[in-house]
Amino acid sequence: MTPADLPPSPGRPGDAVAIGQIGVARGGGVLRTFVGSCVGLVLHARHEGAAGLAHVMLPSSNGNGSPPGKYADTAVIETLRLLRDAVGEPTLSCTAKLVGGAAMFAFHSGMPIGEQNVLALEKILGELGIPITGRLCGGRHGRRLAVDVVTGVVTVETAGQGTETLA
Amino acid sequence: MTPDDGRLAALFRGGADDASHALAKWLGRPASLSVERLDTLPIADAAAVMGSSDALICGCAMRIDGAIGGLLLLTSADDAGLSLADTLLERPTGTSTAWGDLEQSAVIETANIVGCAYLNAICDALGPAGAAGILPSPPVFLRDFPAAIMEAVLMEQPVLSEIVLLARTEFRIDGTPVGCGLLFLPDAASLAALLPSAIDPGTGT
């Protein structure tokens, strides 16, 4: 099945994915969000022309995974599930991209929450065998990201620092 | 619960009154703060409070500990913040065109003076529960996307609850809104302390 074979997603591609939420679309459109210390987790199924974007806030659900997009451990699993449901395939070959994890305030010592989020996602994706093909993480500024659902290309604008593309 | 009404609103209005005096004294001209929003919101909605504009805004953030804790943020659009800096630096409006050290310092000090007056007044109004006062961190200046700033503010909470209380004030100078404001987000422990003190046991509101 190719992207052209797929009907438009019943979701709302183009709408922003809110904090702690997950957006999934297929066959066209753009998924968007803003991230600071949170991390935008992008999963892309190239052959199906589908993508998911989770706005991950915290590294671990500690058994309380609601909403699932909020936590790294539950966000990966739930985004995969939604992607599989969207394309109607029980298995999918996906790649991942990570954007965000900035330390915008420096009020606390220790590892910033953004860095913890990135490490948690890298660990879970590694365990699931999902390759990370692009990342733009860390720093001290927020980012605006837009995911092309079909191509998986992620356009990232970092506040005051210009725009980069993760192909 | 409708925190726009009753004692909780009065608590924040009292804080804004004291902050108005501090702002007027700091600026050397008539100035005031008014409480524009006092809402409890789901966290996903709170992140959108400052809008989804692509235009960068500036903010000065202070971590607050003590009798009431949370995060206090002074926000403004670039032009409004730079005009405020011009006022403080006694320069004609429009002189400042970029955020240099001097301009940043002016708004950081504004956040410090006005924000502390605001929260000290709220502590005083809490009676014994507020006797410990507040322990503010040094303000941090940032210039970023509104949604990313708001997200970072939410993420600074030590315990991230699904519902947050947001109190937003607006500055007026010489009676005119100037596009600057204070946003206070109490942490979960302070929310629990603030709301019982504000809820009328007879009505539950």
Image (spheres, rainbow, N blue to C red):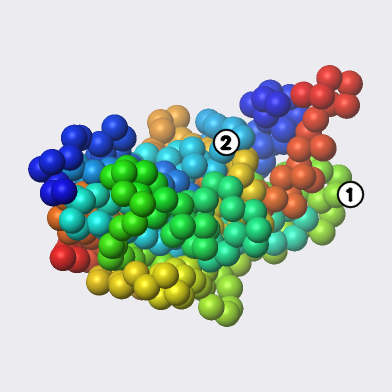
Label placed on residue B48: none
Find numbered disc 2 in the image and state the secondary structure of the residue it sits on.
Answer: strand
Q: Specify the farthest residue to the top.
A: B203
Give the quarter of the figure containing the N terminus of chain B. top right
Residue for badge 2: B41
Give the quarter of the figure containing the C terminus of chain B. top right
Q: Is residue B14 left or right of residue B147?
A: right
The amino acid on which the numbered mark 1 sits, given as a three-letter code, is: Pro
Q: Is residue B20 visible?
A: no
For disc 2, the chain is: B
- In this orientation, which residue lies closer to the viewer: B174 or A154? A154
Residue drawn at x 25%, y 36% as measured from the top left: A9
Q: Is residue A94 visible?
A: yes
Label placed on residue B128: 1
Q: Specify the farthest residue to the bottom.
A: A110
Q: Specify the farthest residue to the front.
A: A90
Q: From the top left corner, tell me how far across and down residue B105 is, in percent.
A: 42, 65
Residue drawn at x 58%, y 48% as measured from the top left: A66
- Image quadrant where residue A35 sits: bottom left
For disc 1, the chain is: B
10 Å crowding of disc 2: few (<14), some (14-19), many (20+):
some
Q: From the top left corner, tell me how far across and down residue B15 is, in percent.
A: 67, 41
